[in-house]
Amino acid sequence: MPIKTVNLATIIEDDVSSAAAIDYAIAFCDVERAHLSCRIAAPLLDLTTARLLPLAQALVDQVNAERLAKANETRGRIETAARISGVPLDCRIVQKPFTAARIDLAAATRASDFVILPQAKGGLSAETGVIESILFEAGRPVIVVPSDWSKGPTFKRIVIAWDGGARAARAVGDAMPILARADEVEVVCVVDDGGPSAAGAELAEHLARHCRAIRLTDLPLEHADAGLTLRAHLDGRRPDLLVMGAYAHSRLWQFVLGGMTKFMMSAANVPVLYSY
């Protein structure tokens, strides 16, 4: 299926949005001849107690004005880059309290083929909240781009993190337009018993009917942590994209136990395509 609509969602607080995700989204649309729909959230700081103190309210108003100015700066940068590349664009700024802005961003991304997001700066950052909201509520495949990524949307070598589950299968299906063009697709299974993964072999056989070249790799689990095991493999392989399913747990369990999805959201060193 051709890719016709790509959504870029970003949030502005203290810093201007990462240029890497913006450049990636525009280059992706340029290659795909797709429309770029951009939403920039500039969350309103709203402190009830500040309304009782004129000086405190003035500081709140200043913060909100600065966020809006940074959002307009980001929009100008996106519009200029899209115009130079000939990418059709619509770009809007959402200035609402964080929770409402996050809901609006998730709703806006549902009418798209792919969503592109900047990687979160940390587990408790606003970007993490936006990524989680869009990933688990929008129903669309999401590509998260590290802030230091400079290669753009090059899809010559792609790694699939495969566990045989339904969400991983959905990610493979969502990524198929990209996988079919890659020079090499590597199916990686993290195994904790030292044995081969039959599920990985079945997927490799299926992908061989779609893709140019398939590699199957079983990674022995290291340090009892699948995220670290996969990250070490990516450090060595340096692919252009990682494809994986996303898994949601309660916030308490996610905080206590961590998890592959949470780890890769902030620690992946390559763009990651997630599906949920």
Image (cartoon, rainbow, N blue to C red):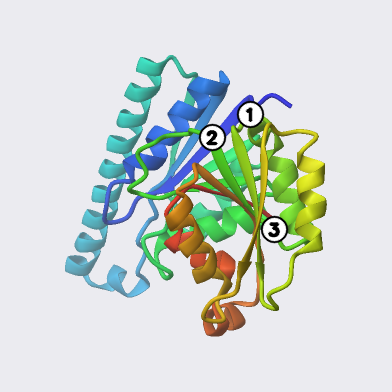
Residue 4 location (% of width, % of height):
63, 24
Q: Earlier in the sequence, mark 2 or mark 3?
A: 2
Amino acid type at mark 3: Trp
In the displayed structure, does residue 50 sit left or right of residue 172? left
Q: Which quadrant holds the C terminus?
A: bottom right
State the CA–CA distance, disc 2 to disc 3.
Answer: 18 Å
State the CA–CA distance, disc 1 to disc 3.
Answer: 19 Å
Label 1 residue SS: loop
Q: Is residue 62 visible?
A: yes
Residue wearing tag 1: 181
Amino acid type at mark 2: Phe
The front one of 42 and 254 is 254
Give the residue displayed 52% in from the left and 21% down from the top. 31
- Label count reads 3
Amino acid type at mark 1: Arg
> Residue most toward the left?
55
Q: Classify residue 141 by image quadrant.
A: top right
Residue wearing tag 3: 162
Residue wearing tag 2: 155
Q: Earlier in the sequence, mark 1 or mark 3?
A: 3
Counting other residues with Cα less than 10 Å from the Cα at mark 2, is it few (<14), some (14-19), or many (20 or more)? Answer: some
